[in-house]
């Protein structure tokens, strides 16, 4: 740790300012001996991502049954996002929660998810990102629960956006940091596994 602190001080010595995005990042920088720091919190536009964006017609638009809870994942459909965790969770979502998992995104696992959706009787819906719409604020506010990336996340916008939309968020502990930040701002709820 001492060597890392010396490295950070030397690396950032020529910088006018080093920006941290959270209280935890600021504390780590101060502990490393960095003095010219400033906090610029990573956040979410709460005028865009807000419970008022809930859209009663959204479920019908994406083909989700009204009677089932909807669990939402928005992000890249790729291995580095650990989408395999969602795939492994699907049988439990189907049998225990009788939920529909909606994945909004694109990436190399999209075709695999489409094949899986065809075999899961409406319990998995794979929807594209719609470029003509604003970011999926309505989807975040209209889902019954959101899931954030499973594993290390640099900023965790999915957890923040879902929480700002008033939607409970589940995911790995790394993603709960974004949820805690959103809770401090008075938006939504976050839970970590």
Image (cartoon, grey):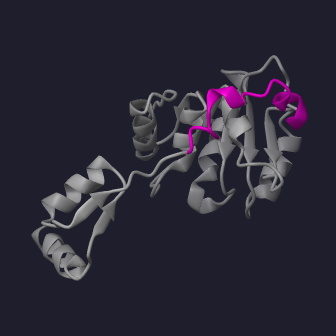
The answer to which of 134 and 152 lies nearer the viewer is: 134
Q: Note whether residue 180 is visible.
A: yes
Instruction: Check the image and report above or below for 102 versus 22.
Output: above
Find the residue positioned furthest to the top: 67
Q: Is residue 154 left or right of residue 13?
A: right
The answer to which of 130 and 144 lies nearer the viewer is: 130
- Residue found 24% across the figure and 63% down from its top: 37
Q: Is residue 146 left or right of residue 142?
A: left
Instruction: Check the image and report above or below for 135 versus 176.
Output: below
- Residue 15: image location, x then y, percent: 26, 78
Q: Is residue 55 left or right of residue 36?
A: right
- Residue found 74% across the figure and 64% down from its top: 108
- Residue found 37% across the figure and 55% down from its top: 40
Image quadrant in which the N terminus is located: bottom left
Image quadrant in which the C terminus is located: top left
Give the residues in magenta: 45-62
Q: Is residue 55 magenta?
A: yes
- Residue 143: image location, x then y, percent: 70, 29
Number of numbered discs on residues = 0
- Residue 83: image location, x then y, percent: 63, 51
Image quadrant in which you'd find residue 54 = top right
Instruction: Check the image and report above or below for 182 versus 105.
Output: above
Q: Note whether residue 143 is visible.
A: no
Q: Is residue 57 left or right of residue 152?
A: right
- Residue 170: image location, x then y, percent: 53, 34
Q: Is residue 178 magenta?
A: no
């Amino acid at each position: 740790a001492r060597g890392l602190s010396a490295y950070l001080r030397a690396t950032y010595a020529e910088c006018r300012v080093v920006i941290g995005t959270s209280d935890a990042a600021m504390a780590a920088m101060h502990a490393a001996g960095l003095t010219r720091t400033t906090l610029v919190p990573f956040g979410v536009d709460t005028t865009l991502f807000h419970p008022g964006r809930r859209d009663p017609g959204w479920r019908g638009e994406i083909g989700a049954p009204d009677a089932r809870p909807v669990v939402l994942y928005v992000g890249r459909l790729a291995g580095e996002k650990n989408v395999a965790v969602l795939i492994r969770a699907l049988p439990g979502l189907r049998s225990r929660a009788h939920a529909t998992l909606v994945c909004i995104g694109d990436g190399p696992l999209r075709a695999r998810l489409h094949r899986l959706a065809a075999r899961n009787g409406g319990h998995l819906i794979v929807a594209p990102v719609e470029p003509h719409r604003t970011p999926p604020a309505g989807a975040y506010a209209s889902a019954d629960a959101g899931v954030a990336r499973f594993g290390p996340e640099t900023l965790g916008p999915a957890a923040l956006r879902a929480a700002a939309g008033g939607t409970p968020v589940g995911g790995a502990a790394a993603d709960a940091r974004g949820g805690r930040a959103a809770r401090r701002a008075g938006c939504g709820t976050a839970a970590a596994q």
